[in-house]
Amino acid sequence: MVITVLELLILSALVAAPAWFLGGGLWAAFAAWLAVGLYAVVLAWKIDRFDRWLSAPNLRLDPPWRGVWREMALRIQRMLRQQEKLVAVHEKRLQDFLLAIQASPNGVILLDEEGRIEWCNVTAAGHLGLDALKDRMQHIVHLVRDPVFARYFSQADHASEAVIEGRSSSVVNKQKLSVQLHAYGEGRSLLLTRDITAVAQAEAMRRDFVANVSHEIRTPLTVLSGFVETLQSLPLDAHERGRYLDLMAVQSQRMQDLVADLLTLSQLEGSSPPGTHQQVPLPELMWKVESEARALSSFMGGLEVTPSQDLVFDPTPDWTLLGSENELQSAVSNLVSNAIRYTPSGGKIHVRWYAQADHCIFAVSDTGPGIAPEHLPRLSERFYRVDRSRSRETGGTGLGLAITKHVAQRHGGELRIESQVGHGSTFMLVLPSSRCVSAAPVQASSAATELQA
């Protein structure tokens, strides 16, 4: 500004001086006025050209001027570059922040003062069935049509959370969501969604477990209580008293078995998976299992020496299992004892070990009544029984297959069940080959084909 005034004064002086000598003061004033006008026109032209340069997309090009105009243009360019760098830094921070929210396992929705969606992450869109782009600036209550959510959104206090069903819910698997509003900024709200399906299922399982345990224990306790009351109130001879005591012993043993299985499950769930340092000779383990199986079959038949079923144990391979001996014996014994309990008298039970691909498999096949397909996915659930009365008659606790499944998973394997109504069942404990060490190279056998046949 100072330079421009100086330029104008110098120009006026240079033009007015000759006019003073030629025509006096009037001509000097006219000449100075004319110089100021011309200077203003030139200055206005330069300002207009400079303004067009500022508005043009080629602002980063080298300014086509010299002197003060070039210096002004260069300063503007430097300021522009600094502002662009600052904007880029803030833009990157914003993108990093949005990416962090997108990676969150919880849903995040930003709402304006009217409750309209300004932004939401992918998780929230999946939870509530939203479209992150199309549903922007739509009211959240109009999109989430849930009476529980509508009441929660309309209330003044949002300190607590509300539980609603997610949009991905189905008849089989209902998703549970926890939603909570938090105020921020000038009237805006932050809506958080959290998938609590697993928590709700765990809570339901805990309730079912307590109810099942209470039910399972209540029955033998009621029987024992009735027998005790009978012994206390009625005069019984030695034979009758002995019969009642035998029945009481059966119920007492049933409760002991139930408590033992519950403790086994608790230990399996609360301990780390077994390593491979402990070696379990398979022939020795199967000798114990076979002895217990034949004794149980004789007991189920009501005789002392004759088994109730035809038990066929294939020769045990000379393998060494790597894992927990107690757990593996429990899993194998459970499969064999279940087959004995549910196979009618005169039926056949086939027990074998064989190698297949990268697994070593323990299979128990029976000629029992078989299991309907709808029951197969739930057989390994705690206390789940296809026929509750039949299970109690045979002395089952309803935890054997649950224990076997846990043991298999802890050893890196799985429990497989194949069954057809009227054609028997096959229960397989499948272990990875890394858990089986043989004296000779393990060859895949045709046992699977024989099993199906």
Image (cartoon, helix red, strand yellow):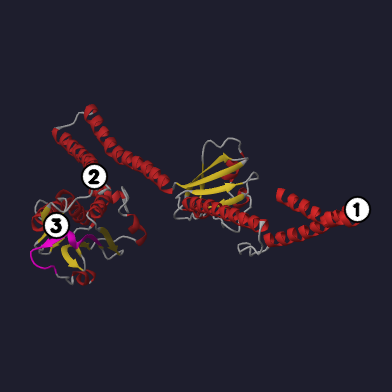
Residue 102: mark? none
Q: Residues within 10 Å of mark 3 (few under 14, many from 20)?
A: many
Separation (CA) of disc 1 from disc 2:
114 Å
Q: Which residue is mark 2?
A: 271
Mark 3 in CB contact with mark 2 (< 8 angstroms) = no
Residue 38: name its quadrant. bottom right
The residue beneath circle 3 is 321
Q: Are marks 3 and 1 in contact (CB under 8 Å)?
A: no
Magenta residues span: 426-442
Residue 408, percent from left and from top: 23, 55
Task: Give the mark nearer the N terminus: 3 vs 2.
Answer: 2
Residue annotated with mark 1 = 24
Q: Is residue 325 above or below residue 217?
A: below
SS label for mark 3: strand
Which amino acid, mark 2? Ser
At 19% from the left and 36% from the top, the residue drawn is 244
Question: Viewed as shown, does residue 135 lie left or right of 200?
Answer: right
